[in-house]
Image (cartoon, rainbow, N blue to C red):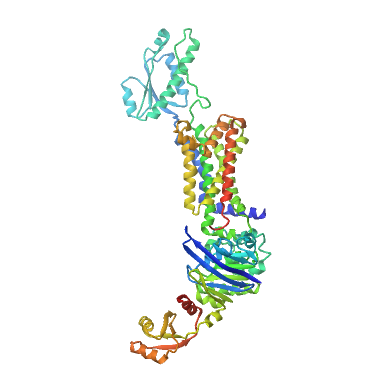
């Protein structure tokens, strides 16, 4: 059975509905899947999550979470999903323990009852349980928020940009926790602007300007990338990028970490490219074949 | 129920941990009652009076002793000649001077008519007027007293009688006013602000995606402020009775009941504001202009409703504090029972029901 079914979902804002945040999105998430919505800020990720968590009414289309319609059966959904908004949304003036107990009570459960589920996460913040939530570090806040969202053992967990503004180590830990939760059979929908987190999901949906560009496993998405990508670097990266984009054989070039990822047109010749770049005065030139990443796919899909 | 209690407990934590706000909320009625009671009063107590007694006989001595006995005056000096009068005022030794002519006693005895002169320092006209009134009242009293013993009646025709408040005590009118004001501030503004705060910090978003009925969230918010208000009502009443000598002439139970009713009216209005607004600033602004200013301006507390132009009089009808103010005055000062205030009570109940229904209807179960 599909845990989440989204069918032509649309959402617009403004008096005349002129700002289209989500445009006829459709996708499905299987039970127990870790599904990532990857997209830059303003892609419509939060609007989508809010519709799925019954906080916003869609303008068109429909969606179901665990078999319940997000509009008609919104009360059922509110009982069985866990939701962690992008912004830290716990009571800053309550302690860690008080926050957790409070959220357990509003979901008609107790911390003890579902302790096994949150144990791995909660033990990390337990030494600070009497500390006010507002005084926690960013990473600890995320752990507390996740504990609170999990305390009632939700069927589906919605995490809206849980790793935004969190340091690299905490981000890594956070994804470890998600993997662990997945093993407990919880369906997880997570949104993130970080492309490097895409590989950690079972399946991903690339989102841009309110549209889903592509859905699939990370391997499927990068596998759909047919062109060759070269990683190119030299002593003058800025000049190099200009030269690359000016070349006829180059489809697209953009900086990617240490290298410039250069998407080549079919039937290109690596030597010709090297000669061309050397002619232009690039020194210490390195040209190597590179595997396409999700970001490369995203860049390409965006251009289409 | 457990859910609800846990909400209420959480609200208490919020209030308790925000010590500054708590201090303001509980201290406000005390400060306001004290300010209105002592600083902003038009009563004058222990005003210095100087006396120029040119007669020094039995009659003047008796009159002077009556002035001395009054709590409004303290005799600060006895003058020897009319020339001292200007000097006394210049040195600020007295605010008012009573001049008794040399012929005071004989005039009184033989002509049945005597003259006294009151000279007041009119640089503060309000105080001067008040003092003249006080002094005149004492003299009139005195004249009445000697009338009792003399065979030939004297022609005095001053008769002033003030119902309920013979000394024109300011406290009688502002205690009900301050009660209305404090309840409004605590209930309307604070409930509106705390609910909107949950929207602002995003906790409302999390709360909505939970099985809790939204109504429960809202009512749980109101409970601590209701209790806080009861504490405030009690402290205002205690201060009124023991510090300001304003008696509670009617039933305390009725007074408390009416106050709680008004508290609920205010809470409902606060809830309505919170349902309609999205930011704490807007909520505060609406609470202030929508409730606080009308309470001061249109409830009859500062300015008599009867003197207002018709449009304002009509508007004052929809100001809940106007009716509450009337109720408190009636119960507390005049000592009336429910038969005297049933009309106002019904109006308040109707307003409360209307506001509450609207607030619940307008409560957003989603983010839009």
* Quadrant in which residue B55 is drawn: top left
Q: Is residue A252 above or below residue B274?
A: below
Q: In terms of depth relative to the viewer, which is nearer, B19 or B277?
A: B277
Where does residue A251 sit, x and y in percent of width and height? 42, 83
Q: In terms of depth relative to the viewer, which is nearer, B60 or B200?
A: B200
Q: Do we see residue B234 in this rendering?
A: no
Q: In terms of depth relative to the viewer, which is nearer, A247 or B23?
A: A247
Residue lying at 51% horizontally and 77% vertically, measured from the top left: A196
Where does residue A254 sit, x and y in percent of width and height? 42, 79
Q: Is residue B50 above or below residue B254?
A: above
Q: How many marks?
A: 0
- Of the 4 image quadrants, the one containing the N terminus of chain A is bottom right
Residue lying at 41% horizontally and 26% vertically, measured from the top left: B131
Q: Is residue A103 left or right of residue B23?
A: right
Where does residue A276 sit, x and y in percent of width and height? 36, 89
Where does residue A282 sit, x and y in percent of width and height? 35, 87
Residue most extreme to the right: A113
Q: Do we see residue A33 in this rendering?
A: yes
């Amino acid at each position: 059975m599909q845990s989440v079914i989204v069918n032509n979902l649309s959402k617009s804002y403004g008096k005349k509905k002129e700002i289209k945040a989500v445009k006829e999105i459709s996708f499905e998430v299987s039970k127990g899947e870790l599904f990532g919505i990857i997209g830059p800020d303003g892609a419509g990720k939060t609007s989508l999550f809010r519709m799925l968590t019954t906080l916003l009414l869609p303008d068109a289309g429909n969606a179901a979470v665990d078999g319940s319609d997000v509009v008609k059966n919104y009360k059922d959904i509110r009982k069985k999903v866990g939701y962690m908004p992008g912004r830290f949304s716990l009571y800053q003036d309550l302690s860690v323990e008080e926050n957790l107990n409070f959220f357990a009570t509003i979901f008609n459960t107790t911390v003890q009852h579902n302790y096994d589920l949150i144990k791995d996460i909660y033990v990390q913040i337990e030494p600070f349980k009497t500390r006010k939530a507002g005084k926690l570090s960013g990473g600890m806040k995320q752990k507390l928020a996740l504990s609170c969202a999990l305390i009632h053992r939700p069927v589906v967990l919605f995490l809206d940009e849980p790793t935004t503004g969190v340091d690299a180590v905490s981000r890594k830990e956070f994804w470890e926790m998600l993997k662990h939760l997945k093993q407990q059979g919880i369906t997880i929908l997570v949104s993130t602007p970080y492309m490097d987190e895409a590989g950690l999901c079972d399946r991903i949906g690339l989102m841009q300007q309110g549209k889903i560009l592509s859905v699939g496993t990370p391997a499927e998405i990068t596998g759909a990338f047919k062109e060759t990508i070269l990683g190119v670097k030299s002593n003058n990266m800025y000049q190099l990028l200009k030269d690359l984009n000016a070349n006829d054989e180059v489809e697209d070039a953009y900086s990617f970490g240490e290298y410039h990822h250069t998407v080549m047109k079919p039937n290109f010749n690596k030597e010709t490219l090297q000669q061309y770049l050397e002619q232009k005065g690039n020194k210490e030139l390195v040209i190597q074949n590179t595997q396409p990443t999700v970001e490369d796919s995203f860049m390409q899909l965006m251009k289409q | 129920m457990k859910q609800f209690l846990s909400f209420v407990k959480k609200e208490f934590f919020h209030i308790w941990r925000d010590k500054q706000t708590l201090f303001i909320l509980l201290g406000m009625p005390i400060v306001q009652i004290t300010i209105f009671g002592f600083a902003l009063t038009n009563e004058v107590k222990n005003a210095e009076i100087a006396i120029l007694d040119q007669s020094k006989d039995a009659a003047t001595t008796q009159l002077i002793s009556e002035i001395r006995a009054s709590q409004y005056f303290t005799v600060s000096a006895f003058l020897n000649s009319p020339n001292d009068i200007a000097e006394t005022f210049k040195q600020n030794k007295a605010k008012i001077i009573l001049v008794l002519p040399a012929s005071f006693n004989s005039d009184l005895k033989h002509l049945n008519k005597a003259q006294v002169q009151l000279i007041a320092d009119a640089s503060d006209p309000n105080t001067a007027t008040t003092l003249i009134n006080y002094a005149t009242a004492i003299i009139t009293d005195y004249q009445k007293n000697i009338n009792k013993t003399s065979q030939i009646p004297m022609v005095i025709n001053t008769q002033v009688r003030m119902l309920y408040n013979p000394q024109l005590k300011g406290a009688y009118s502002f205690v009900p006013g301050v009660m209305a004001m404090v309840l409004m501030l605590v209930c309307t503004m604070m409930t509106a602000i705390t609910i909107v705060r949950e929207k602002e910090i995003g906790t409302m978003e999390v709360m909505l995606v939970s099985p809790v009925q939204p109504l429960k969230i809202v009512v749980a918010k109101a409970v601590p402020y209701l209790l806080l208000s009861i504490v405030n009502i009690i402290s205002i009443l205690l201060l009124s009775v023991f510090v300001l000598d304003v008696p509670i002439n009617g039933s305390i139970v009725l007074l408390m009941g009416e106050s709680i009713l008004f508290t609920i009216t205010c809470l409902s209005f606060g809830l309505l504001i919170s349902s309609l607004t999205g930011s704490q600033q807007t909520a505060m602004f609406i609470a202030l202009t929508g409730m606080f200013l009308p309470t001061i301006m249109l409830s009859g507390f500062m300015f008599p409703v009867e003197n207002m132009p018709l449009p304002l009089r009509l508007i004052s009808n929809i100001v809940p504090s106007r009716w509450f103010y009337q109720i408190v005055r009636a119960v507390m000062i005049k000592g009336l029972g429910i038969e005297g205030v049933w009309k106002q009570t019904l109006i308040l109940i109707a307003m409360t029901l209307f506001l509450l229904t609207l607030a619940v209807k307008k409560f957003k179960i989603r983010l839009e």
